[in-house]
Image (cartoon, helix red, strand yellow):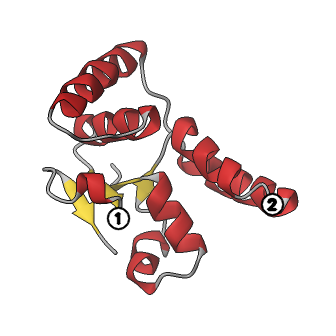
Amino acid sequence: MAEYFYDSYAIIEYLRGNRAFQKYFKEPRGVTTRFNLIEVYCRLLDDPDFAEEVYSSFSSVLVDPTDGQLKRAMVMRRELKGKGLNISYADAIGYLVARDRKARFLTGDNEFKDVPHVEFVK
């Protein structure tokens, strides 16, 4: 079972060469969803070939959330927004999938700084 869930933020920082994230990606120790990966792809579209390469290279660690997980993630997102946390749909889905898989949600997104089950790295 994966130790970590790779949030879009973590993948981007890894690709930028941020040393703080490198150890989490040396051997695939995590998973991500298509929702997170498509956020990364979108950010990389200034270089379409690189965007394709990254998307392909992370396809081996993709997990597909169930319909139940998707619905629960949206309920959770709404609750967190009520507490002042502004997270994306992809983040909500990823965080819920991470919790269900008993994996740490790897991110540096400030919205997750003090949230349980998060591996917060900058």
What label does residue 46 carry, if any? 2
Category of crowding for the residue at label 1, using alpha-carbon neighbours closer than 10 angstroms: few (below 14), some (14–19), many (at least 20): some
User: To which quarter of the image does residue 34 belong?
Assistant: top right
Q: Residue drawn at (43%, 31%), measured in percent from left and top?
A: 89
Where residue 98 sits: x, y (%)? 30, 42
Q: Nearer the viewer, residue 1 or 88?
A: 88
Q: Where is the C terminus found, in terms of image quarters?
A: bottom left
Vertical arrangement, residue 89 with respect to residue 103, above or below: above
11 on left or right of 67 = right
Of marks 2 and 1, which one's residue comes earlier in the chain? 2
Vertical arrangement, residue 79 with respect to residue 24, above or below: above
Where residue 12 sits: x, y (%)? 55, 64
Mark 1 residue element: loop
Amino acid type, residue under disc 2 in the picture: Asp
Amino acid type, residue under disc 1 in the picture: Gly
Q: Which of 3 and 55 is in front in this view?
A: 55
Query: Which residue is farthest right?
Result: 49
Q: Name the residue under label 1.
A: 108
* Residue 3 appears anywhere in the view: no
